[in-house]
Each structure stands twice: as C-alpha cells, then as structure tokens.
Image (cartoon, grey):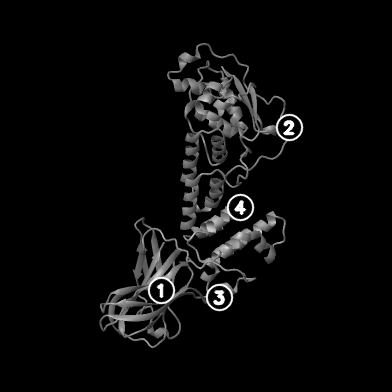
C-alpha cells in the first residue's frame, strides 16, 4: 500500500476510510443468489432501510498540498486515490441496511478498468447521478474490486473470495475473476469440493467445476461425508451421479444420496418418509446403479425401485498400481478340489483392491477357471467378486486376476480374500509374512497384516498356500 504522505502524528483520509471499511466487513455476505454458507459468507439478513446518507468516515480533512510529489510512480499515485475522497467524482452506497457503506471513487479509473463502469458513466444510457446504490454487492468485495482497479493488488481470503468473484463478474473484470478462481483452486480439498462445485456452477466457471469433479472422483467417500454435500442442489447431485469415475461402492453412494434426500425433505418441510425421499430425488434416483450392488446390499434397499437403472461400472483409479507379495519362497505342488483358498487381512489406510496375483500350473501353459471374492469378515458381506478365467505359462510367476470394479477397503477392518480355482496342480507360496509394508513414490506407507482364516481353506494359511499377491491403488 502506498503511503499517504501526511505529517507525523496525523492519519490520512485514505487510512481512516480503509480502517472503517475493514471494520465493517465482519458479518458481511455475498450478494450472489444461492451462495453457500460454509467458509463463504451467506446472504445478508434483511435489515432496516439504509440511512439517507451512510457514514463516510474521515472525508472532511484537507488534502495535503503537493501529495503527488511524494509518489514516485503512476501506480503509487493511483493507489493513493483508492477509497479516497480526494478528486473523487462519484460515490457508491454499497450493501444494504446497517451494513451499507459510502465509498468514493473516480469515474475515469473505473471506466478504464471495466466495460460495465464505462457504459455506466459514458454510454448512451449513462447515469448523471453522483451517488449510486449497489445493494446486491458486499462492501468488502467492492473494495477488493476497487483496490484491484486502482493498484492491481489482489486482497482476497476464504471469507471474501466468493463475494469478490461475484463482484468481478458483475463488473466484467476477468483478471480479478481469474485470481479468485486460482485462489479457490489452490484451496480445493475433498471436504469443500461440493461447496465449491455448487459455486462454480452458479458463477459459470467450467474450469473450477472440472477440478471440483476431479477431486470428488479421487476422494469420493471423503467428499460425500463433508457437510457441504447435503446442501447441494438437485442439478449438481445429478451431475455427480452421472459420472462413471466415482471411486466408491454403489451401496455407499446410495447411502449418501439418502442423506441428501433427508436434508432436502427438511428444506421442503416434508416428513422424511420413503415416499417423500423418492419424490425429492426425482430425476436423481434412476442415476443410482442398483445393478452394481451385491444381492445382500440390494436386499437392504427399501422400498425397492421400480424403474430401469444403469449397470455401467464406475471406476476412478488414479496414480500408480501397487501390489504386495506375502510369500518369500515358491514351491510345488498345490491341488484343487472345489474348496476355496482363503486368507484374512487388514490394512492401515483406505485403499481400493483391484485384483489378486495367483500362482499357475506346474505342468506348463494351462487355463484356470476361478472365482475371486473379498468379504468383510465380521459382517460376512461380499464386497466384490468375479467369475473369470486366466492363463498361465507354466512358470512360478504370479498371474493377475482382476475384479470387475475396485473394492474399497477401509483402514483397520478385517477382510477375507478368497479364490476358488478349477484346474491342474499349481505352484504355491511358503515362508509367509504376517506383515508387509509398501512405500509409495511420495513416501506414503501401506501396511498389510495377514491372519489365517478359520476352517479348511484348501490348506491356505498365513505361512503357506495360495493368494500370494494383492493388487491395489491408494
């Protein structure tokens, strides 16, 4: 900020006004319709009609003679005039009610930086008034806009960025719009992705909307658990449900959608009955892919849907594929008689398992029929399975067998990996490890703990047997 050049011990008009402006910013809110509440100011509460002349603090002081000589650049001279009565030829009554502020400005500076202001002051329908009311704009956001037009300085924060973006769009200042979008992009996280997606759609910011959707794809469960999810509108909900790239099981996605429906019933003052939830979901309900649920998961859906649903799998796996091998040595021979090989495990962090590495035949190239499953052990719920086949080349290598869609694994929950093979005798692993840790390129460690599963399990234990590899994404 350029100094005012006033004598020692005095305070300039500029500084007085800016302090007054800043002191009036708490509790202010966006004038944009439909603005969200979390981390972004909400719509201003209705107040009494603004006074005939809102206070303009420090405007009666005499300007310092030859102040221009104290400013060494054009930028400093214009910055000095920001929010200053000196040479001003227009004043804005910004905001409404008791939050309204009277802000001086200079038509030439505003018209040079904004086509909207240029038309306002110089167009065919130009105003002749020297005092203009802007009840839909927040004083803090309008000051941020003026500061940018006078000095190219950007002053935005989490509490003011949305109102500033709205004001920059209203007055067609794309450079400030870009700064606001860049700020939002840098602060985009899973827990605010839905809030920012709603705002991006409201303000027609396709780049920001795309980045929000990418974040939701990558961390779907965290985004759905955030407070902002239940506040989104039906169109935003549908835009997300149409995506093939969400990284979450359909039953958990459906649970989140039910939470949204309950919140929408509350907003519409409807009892949260099953019928009303279906009513408020409307066009969103057919976007739930019930065919992707297991029989057990679908059995918990009540009442049952009566329309056709999409059965295209969702898959959002980004980054690098990893695998761990729980055995230190390979031996021969392991036979199959229709009994499943099983091993229990848990992981220290949430991952998505996409398949197993299995041993192949000791008799040369062979084809196997196989059913693979992951079961949540305590609840005995099958989370993912696939009936498929694979071919081996007769070596002691492992061979990938993949699930149709990723299986979400939560931290510190015990699961059972299951493989039922039909084919000739195979290799098997020995000297099994109870604990296996894999470190990613970014230094993140994923640790698996293995436990023998009770029962026959075709002989597979923590020490010996099948299912040597687990293939996953973090």
Question: What residue sits right under mark 1 in the picture?
Answer: 450
Mark 1 vs mark 4, foreground winner is: 4
Q: Is residue 87 left or right of residue 454?
A: right
Q: Is residue 117 left or right of residue 185?
A: right
Mark 1 vs mark 3, foreground winner is: 3
Question: What residue sits right under mark 2 in the picture?
Answer: 49
In the image, residue 200 above or below residue 220:
above
Q: Earlier in the sequence, mark 4 or mark 3?
A: 4
Q: Are marks 1 and 4 in contact (CB under 8 Å)?
A: no
Q: Residue at 51% x, 66% y: name it.
A: 249
Q: CA distance from mark 4 to mark 3?
A: 30 Å
Q: CA distance from mark 2 to mark 1?
A: 69 Å
Residue 240 spot, x, y in % from top left: 53, 57
Q: Residues within 10 Å of mark 4 (few under 14, many from 20)?
A: few
Q: CA distance from mark 3 to mark 2?
A: 60 Å
Question: What residue sits right under mark 4 in the picture?
Answer: 233
Residue 383 spot, x, y in % from top left: 49, 72
Q: Residues within 10 Å of mark 2 (few under 14, many from 20)?
A: few
Q: Earlier in the sequence, mark 3 or mark 2?
A: 2
Q: Are marks 3 and 2 in contact (CB under 8 Å)?
A: no
Quarter of the image for residue 290 reads bottom right
Provide the secondary structure element on which disc 4 rests: loop
Q: Residues within 10 Å of mark 1 (few under 14, many from 20)?
A: many
Question: What residue sits right under mark 3 in the picture?
Answer: 296
Q: Residue at 72% x, 56% y: name it.
A: 269
Quarter of the image for residue 452 reads bottom left
């Amino acid at each position: 900020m350029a100094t005012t050049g006033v004598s020692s011990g005095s305070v300039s008009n500029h500084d007085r006004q800016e302090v007054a402006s800043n002191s009036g910013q708490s509790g202010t809110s966006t004038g944009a319709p439909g603005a969200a509440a979390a981390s972004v100011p909400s719509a201003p509460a209705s107040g009494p009609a603004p006074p005939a002349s809102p206070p303009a603090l420090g405007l009666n002081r005499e300007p310092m003679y030859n102040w221009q000589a104290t400013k060494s650049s054009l930028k400093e001279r214009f910055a000095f005039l920001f929010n200053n009565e000196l040479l001003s030829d227009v004043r804005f009554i910004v905001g409404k009610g008791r939050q309204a502020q009277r802000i001086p400005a200079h038509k030439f500076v505003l018209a040079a930086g904004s086509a909207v202001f240029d038309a306002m002051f110089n167009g065919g329908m130009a105003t002749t008034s020297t005092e203009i009311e802007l009840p839909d704009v927040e004083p803090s956001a309008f000051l941020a806009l003026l500061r940018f037009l006078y000095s190219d300085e950007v002053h935005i924060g989490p509490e003011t960025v949305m109102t500033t973006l709205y004001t920059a769009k209203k007055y067609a200042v794309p450079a400030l719009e870009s700064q606001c979008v860049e700020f939002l992009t840098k602060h985009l996280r899973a827990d605010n992705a839905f809030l920012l997606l709603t705002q991006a759609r409201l303000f027609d910011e396709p780049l920001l909307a795309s980045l929000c959707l990418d974040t939701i794809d990558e961390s779907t469960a965290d985004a759905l658990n955030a407070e902002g999810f239940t506040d989104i509108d039906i169109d935003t909900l549908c835009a997300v449900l149409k995506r093939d790239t969400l990284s979450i099981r359909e039953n958990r996605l459906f649970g989140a959608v039910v939470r949204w429906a309950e919140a929408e019933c509350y907003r519409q003052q409807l009892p949260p009955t099953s019928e009303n939830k279906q009513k408020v979901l409307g066009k969103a309900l057919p976007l739930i892919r019930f065919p992707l649920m297991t029989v057990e998961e679908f059995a918990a859906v009540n009442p049952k849907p009566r329309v056709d649903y999409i059965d295209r799998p969702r898959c959002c796996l980004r980054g690098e594929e990893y695998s761990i091998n729980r055995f230190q040595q390979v031996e021969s021979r392991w036979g199959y008689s229709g009994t499943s090989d099983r091993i229990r495990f848990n992981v220290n962090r949430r991952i998505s398992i996409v398949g197993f590495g299995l041993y192949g035949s000791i008799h040369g190239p062979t084809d196997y029929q196989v059913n693979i499953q992951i079961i949540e052990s305590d609840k005995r719920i099958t989370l993912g399975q696939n009936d498929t086949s694979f071919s081996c080349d007769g070596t002691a290598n492992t061979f990938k067998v993949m699930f149709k869609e990723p299986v979400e694994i939560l931290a510190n929950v015990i699961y059972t990996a299951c493989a039922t093979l039909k084919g000739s005798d195979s290799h098997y692993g020995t000297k099994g490890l109870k604990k296996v840790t894999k470190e990613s390129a970014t230094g993140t460690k994923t640790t698996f703990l293995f436990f023998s599963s009770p029962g026959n399990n075709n002989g597979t234990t923590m020490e010996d047997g099948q299912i040597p590899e687990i293939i996953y994404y973090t």
